[in-house]
Image (cartoon, helix red, strand yellow):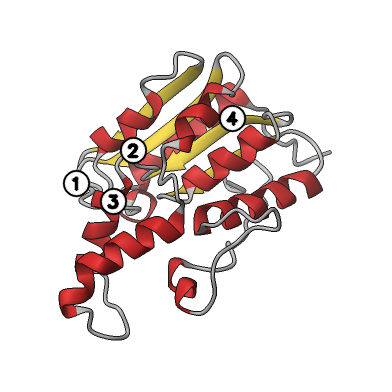
Amino acid sequence: MNELGFDAFAFQLNGTALDILKRLPVTAEGTIGVKHVYAAQIEKLLNEIPGKKIVYAFSNPSAAAIEAMAKRHCVDTIALICDSGPTARFLPSVWKLVRNYKFPFPLGALKLPATAALGVFWSLSFHKDMQDQLAKFPENFPILSIRGWKDKLIPPSHIDEVFEPHHNLNWTKLNLPEAEHLTGLRDFRSEYAPGVDAFLKRVATQLNPFN
């Protein structure tokens, strides 16, 4: 983002789905779910950063960003970029993750129960609450959806199901035919960067390095 002429604040979300083995993921308001814990962190940071902002989110945590933005009524967030997510079909994505992810211990026959457990602890509503949240976004709200056509974890069609029902969104796709899950910038920068650059220039103003 800095190379493209935009200021950027990057952060790592605290806690992962594996943390449910240590403690129950619960927000200060008592909502259970890693997704909602993530959303609370994002909301707090958005409150602390002054001025207008563009949110850049990745994979399924994009759903947490959407939740945080909806809670704040998009008061100062003017656009959203989602790379490789979120999915409208959460459990199939978790199942693929459990089957392919190298856990520090063998799951064996526990893969199916682990999928159900991770789904529940991500959010009791899975991703169904996203629909109500996106409906609260302002009219003509700009969203860039980046997707790799070879993404086996979150297929592009599952991403489309998230955004297509919402006519209030001005959303566009950045299609990367050879990319897999979150490999676009790393492996196909020549296609990725110009698409993001064009979107940012449409919704925001680049910083003047001489100011």
Q: Secondary structure at mark 2?
A: loop
Q: At label 4, which amino acid type do we have?
A: Ala
* Residue 16 or residue 110, whichever sits in front: 110
- Looking at the rendered image, the disc whose residue lies closer to the viewer, 1 or 3, is 3
State the residue in front, 2 or 78: 78
Secondary structure beneath dot 4 equals strand
Looking at the rendered structure, the secondary structure element under dot 3 is: helix
Distance CA(mark 2)–CA(mark 4): 20 Å
- What residue is disc 3 on? 91
Give the residue at mark 1.
Answer: 150
State the residue at coordinates (43%, 35%): 194
Q: Which residue is mark 4?
A: 79
User: Label 2: which residue?
Assistant: 88
Q: Position of residue 103 (x, y in %)?
A: 30, 79
Q: Position of residue 123 (x, y in %)?
A: 46, 52
> Residue 135: x, y in percent?
52, 22
